[in-house]
Image (cartoon, grey):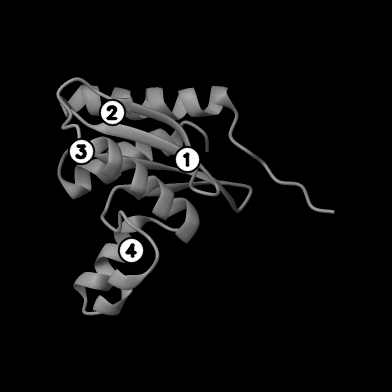
Amino acid sequence: MQTKSILSQTDVIQVLDAAQKEADSNGWPVTIAVTDDGGHLLALRRLDGAAPFSADVATQKARSAALGRKETQIFEEMINSGRTAFVSAPLQGLLSGGVPIIVDDHVVGAVGISGVKPDQDVQIAKAGVSAIG
């Protein structure tokens, strides 16, 4: 029998707080979403000034990163490089800003950020992920 690590609520809060700290230090109004390894939403934090639609986009980015087991930036680059058929994949949020949370070489969840430029979304997501690993 195999065992797997999961994100606790303490872990989720640490991820949210680290991501928010990065966003706040740069004055970036974003939404932060954290999912489990199946892409199910565990927490959502929309910072003051973040656009309402960013809540859905951040959630979809986190879901895609968890289910795809890789950063969503990779999916966006594939599409932009001409692999347009990937747009029909059963995922949404194929834009930069979704980063999986990896513990002991296994994806245990993901962070999705929406609200600023793609590289800034990624920067915030990676700050959140760094709180765990």
Vertical comparison of 64 with 16: above or below: below
The residue type indicated by label 1 comes to: Thr
Check disc 2 and report the residue beneath it.
22
The answer, for residue 84, to whether it is visible in the render is yes
Disc 3 marks a residue whose amino acid type is: Phe
Q: Nearer the viewer, residue 8 or 22?
A: 8
Frontmost residue, 88 versus 132: 88
User: Would you say 16 lies left or right of 9 here?
Assistant: left
Indicate whether 28 appears above or below 95. Answer: above
Using the rendered image of the protein, determine whether residue 69 is visible from the camera's viewpoint. Answer: no
Closer to the eye: label 3 or 4? 3
Q: CA distance from mark 4 to mark 2?
A: 22 Å
Q: Which residue is mark 4?
A: 74
Calculate the distance from the C-alpha at mark 2 to the C-alpha at mark 3: 21 Å
Q: Nearer the viewer, mark 4 or mark 2?
A: 4
Between discs 3 and 4, the one toward the N terminus: 3
* Residue for badge 3: 53
Foreground: disc 1 or disc 3:
3
Q: Which mark is residue 10?
A: none
Residue 73 image point, x, y percent: 30, 58
The answer for how far apart the CA atoms under marks 3 and 4 are is 23 Å
121 lies above or below 107: above
Mark 1 and mark 3: Cα distance apart in space:
18 Å
Residue name at image x 27 percent, y 44 percent: 57
